Image (cartoon, rainbow, N blue to C red):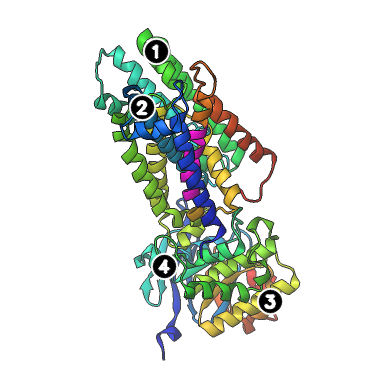
Amino acid sequence: MPNKKTYLLIFLLICLCAFFFLDLIFGSVSIPFKNVWHALTGHDSETNNQIIQNIRLPKAITAVLSGMALSVCGILMQTLFRNPLAGPYVLGVNSGASLGVAFAMLSASFYGLKISGFFADLRIVTAAVIGALTVMFLVMTVAKKIKNNTGLLLAGIMLGQMISSFQSLLEYFADPESLKSFVVWNMASISNTTFSDLILLAPLVCALCLLSLLIMKKLDVLLLGDDYATSLGVNVKQLRLTIIIITGILSGVTTAFCGPVAFIGIAIPHLSRLLLKTSLHKYIIPASLLMGPCIMLLCDIICQLPPNGVLLPLNVITSVIGAPVVLYLLLKNNKVIS
Amino acid sequence: MSLADNIQLQLTNLVIGYGGRIVLDNINVTLKGGTVTGLIANNGTGKSTLLKTLGGNLDPVGGKIELNGRDSSSFSHAEFAKKVAIVLTEKPQLGGFKVWDLVALGRFPYTNMFGHLSAEDKRIIEQSIQACGISELSEKNCLELSDGEFQKAMIARALAQQTDVLLLDEPTAFLDYSSKRNLFTLLRSIAEKENKIILVSSHDIEALLKYVHHVFILKKLKASTFHPVEEVKDKDPEHFLM
């Protein structure tokens, strides 16, 4: 018989479907639900078909994928560092990916490179993943020396600041056209992805989220500490490397397509733990894989709410939702959070 | 004689240490199934280092560890986890874990990739919880436990691992008098009933000597010595630790 946690997961799945369709409805042009359905199947007016199929559908799918990716990154980093305050944004992993993207976008004009389409995407994604992985290894090295939670957080912030300085330097020397596109990207948005971008984003995110489901049993044991994990038969070095690779790639690929999205990675795992009242990964990974997309879709819907086609920056909304969760964690020593 | 009767942990010229630093050398002993051995030493002599080396957390600097005649380095991670369990002094912060969930982690080496627990696994978990006298705590969050209660839950987890060898580093550190007595009685009965090798370190030498079968004494710059408990029971600890 299904338990309460299973019902909560089903509830989250229903919320995900509802938010997905709501995200298709909201936008600068008002399209009623009935027409959205017709446009999805290509049976509405040409304009509506275009808006839904080429703009809103890729955007909603990107929200789902980035929500999944960032939530899984958050869980894995919190387990790896055994630190409830860990996440790709707060520990500077997103900044590393941003520096990679800055280097790829701004240096292209410097060297007179003109690449477009899939290979331009691939170049930016590769640079972002390299940037994210480099920061992950740096943070891992620092974490070995600094054992307390707040210390690690401060080290992450310092690392992020240092990376931002390099980024500013690249911006200073960039030509105006590249700089403009970089500044727009840096504000984080899921509105610019197309179906051709999803060819790269979707398989990577799905494969790595699946991989995280396959290691969930080992993640529980890792929470006991390296010594206990080894004694229970886990190859800790191998597991740590797997986690670093998954988080580096997920964080890098998401940042490359959506910009540095704030707070989703740290907040969603905690919201999942609070909802399901457990830290067991067999529950919180599936819950976060559903809740992350829900919150990303909700944030995107809120971004569209202002009238006259005004679109709010995504990070404003994700920060309004995510930052209070971090504050809550700092203020209250919650029993559910490890 | 069944195979279980032959359980044996043999240390030959073992040298222990970490990070290139030798902590203790010339460790020789053979521990047999069905016995509890008390590990006694002054602070900083290398008790925890020895237990971590035997538990597979540290590589030996030199010498040999053999379990039932097989070199411990030849075991895979998964095989070794079914042979040796360890309870350390560190207290992991496990919010969101019930005591039952924590003890269930002991079944890790036996379950599939997704950690599915069979009816037999669940029976062993319940049995381990009962043996440690913490049945009423099984639904409690680990963060709500006292240090002593958490220690018992960690011992139950090690029991659920169903290994031939059980290593315990200072398990009585946080326990009151009656809990200490119950724990040592439990360890002795488990060793005797299930033919396990139990090696337990403690600074509470008086309590330890009442319940163990043997003592293994580590000394700085001297060879380690192994005695039946009767040999040292009535002696002043100062005398045999020097």
Q: Are marks 3 and 4 on the same chain?
A: yes
Name the mark nearer the viewer: 4 or 2: 2
Q: Are marks 1 and 2 on the same chain?
A: yes
- Residue extending furthest toward the top: A176
Q: Residue at x 49, y 37 (%)?
A: A19
Q: Secondary structure at mark 2?
A: loop
Q: From the viewer's perspective, is residue A111 above or below residue B33? A: above
Q: Residue at x 69, y 57 (%)?
A: B144
Name the mark nearer the viewer: 4 or 1: 1
- Find the distance from the CA under tag 4 to the CA under tag 1: 57 Å
Instruction: Tell me the kind of residue under disc 1.
Output: Leu
**Residue A174 x/y as whole percent:** 37, 11
What residue sits right under mark 1 in the picture? A179
What residue sits right under mark 3 in the picture? B182
From the image, give the main secondary structure of the stretch colored magenta: helix
- Residue extending furthest toward the bottom: B1
Magenta stretch? A284-298
The answer to whether mark 2 and mark 3 are in CB contact below 8 A is: no
The answer to if B153 sits in the magenta stretch is no
Who is closer to the viewer here, A168 or A193?
A193
